Amino acid sequence: MNGNKGPRLLAHERQKDLEEASPAAQTPTVPNARVQKNGFVADIVISNHESAPQIFHYVIQHEGSTEIVHWGQELSFQRALESIEQYLAQFNAKKA
């Protein structure tokens, strides 16, 4: 696996997936995504408060660690992915 090809989306749970689940399986969960690259893992969690716009929170950690190395929030899923990629790009530059 080449780590220079961009982030790898590991999981993504959409609202449609939640709606199609059986009533017994439906629990109040927050849609999310997980990205893995260069020994880091980043989780994106979407806040779905009806009275406010969606906010995409992201947390970046070393794989296997509970320590947060960077976190932030964006107004779109795409911008959250771009922010993660921008943060992780500095580690590609150090390897070169």
Image (tube, helix red, strand yellow):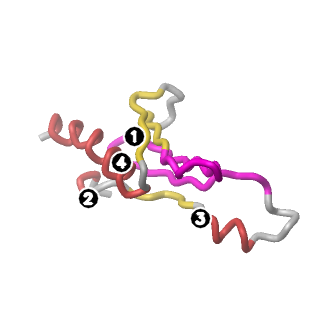
Q: Dividing the picture into quarters, in which one does residue 16 lie?
A: bottom right
* Label drawn at residue 14: 3
Tell me the residue that label 2 is attached to: 5
Helix, strand or loop for disc 3: loop
Residue 55 is marked as none
Disc with the residue nearer the chain's start (3 vs 4): 3
Question: Which residue lies at the image location 37% right of the left edge and 57% below the top edge?
Answer: 78
**Alpha carbon separation for disc pair 4 and 1:** 5 Å
Residue lying furthest right: 24
Q: Amino acid at mark 3?
A: Arg
Which amino acid type is marked by label 2?
Answer: Lys
Q: Is residue 28 magenta?
A: yes
If you read the primary sequence from the N terminus, does the residue marked by circle 4 or circle 2 appear first?
2
As drawn, 17 above or below 32: below
Can you name the residue that lies furthest to the front here?
51
Taking 84 as reference, is 55 left or right? right
Q: Which residue is mark 4?
A: 37
Q: CA distance from mark 1 to mark 3?
A: 23 Å
Residue segment shown in magenta: 27-56
